[in-house]
Amino acid sequence: MQIPGVETVLWNINDGEPPAADVLVTERPLDPAHRSRVSRIPGLKHVHLLSLGYEWVLEHLPSEAVLSNSRGAVEDSTAEHCLALVLAALRELPAAMASQKEQEWPRLWTSSLFGSNVVVLGVGGVGTATIERLKAFKPARITGVASSPRILDDGTDVVALRDAAELLPEADVVICTLPHTPQTQGLIDAGFLRRMRDGALLVNVGRGPIVNTADLLDELRSGRLRAALDVTDPEPLPTGHPLWTAPNCIITPHMAGDTSEFMRLVIPRNSCGWCRIWRLSKFSGYPPVRHRTTLFTAT
């Protein structure tokens, strides 16, 4: 990739120690042990993440560095994937695919998003994009959950997180789009899950640690609840982990934002890689950001 005044250095954050650089553009390392490599980049002034989530990098960010994320490039694809998970689970597509593999033609009666009561935890960019798409399927009700109650511009009711438990007994689908923070860590635990109605579906496209995995496994094994997860705890999910084979559970490998459209939005067409360091001859010459990003000052 040729940018005037910029030397491009390809570096894989999962593979080795970093060279000196002014700007790092990266995704989250697969191995948590590699996250600290960000703090060891000499001269680092700016970190741009190819994601919305940024919590993993905060403790490793140099005090003088600025952090930005890919706000505006991820929300639509994540919401699209969320809807795919909801529909696949409600319409029993894994069971239909298993029948196809066996060349069988059973009659499958399924639940439906049409007429369902849906609760969406989180009404940020992903949450609101998800609500927008849900409406096309005519659920009976959509209720958002956030830190404070309000009404969205489209008329969707939003209740406070402290009152979310009251919604669960009537919810057919509960969708989590929340970020991972100290307040959301383990939010969806045994008590939360017990309040969900029999046969309800939990969908998580937020962050894995928001759900207590052991508590979710208990509910899945009992056959009482269903789940569709794009994020898990731990992540990546190790080979042999019981969540892989849990009944009534669909798992995708944290791929909700990984689309060709995302790559088009965040990386110029002539670039050749997704994890790169930019070493600038002059920091004031940093190329303009194509899409508005949310900036965070390191502390």
Image (cartoon, grey):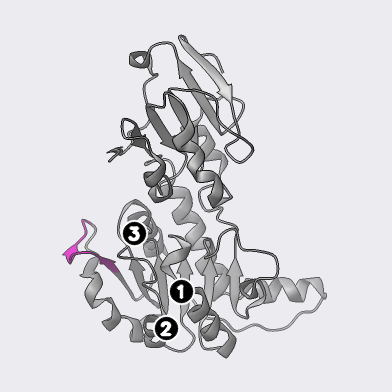
Which residue is situated farthest in the right direction here? 103
Residue at image x 40%, y 58%? 133
On the image, numbered disc 1 is attached to which residue?
212
On the image, numbered disc 2 is attached to which residue?
190
Camera-side residue of 187 and 87: 187
| x and y, in percent, of residue 46 in the image | 38, 29
Quarter of the image where the N terminus is located: top right
What kind of residue is marked 1?
Asn
| x and y, in percent, of residue 161 in the image | 25, 70
Position of residue 194 relative to residue 89, above or below, is below
Residue 160: quarter of image:
bottom left
- Label 3 with label 2: CB-CB less than 8 Å: no
Residue at image x 54%, y 14%? 2
Secondary structure beneath disc 1? Answer: loop
| x and y, in percent, of residue 224 in the image | 52, 88
What kind of residue is marked 3?
Thr
Q: CA distance from mark 2 to mark 1?
A: 8 Å
| x and y, in percent, of residue 291 in the image | 37, 32
Q: Is residue 119 magenta?
A: no
Q: Earlier in the sequence, mark 2 or mark 1?
A: 2
What range of the chain is rendered magenta?
A: 144-153
On the image, numbered disc 3 is attached to which residue?
181
Q: CA distance from mark 3 to mark 2?
A: 19 Å
What kind of residue is marked 2?
Ala
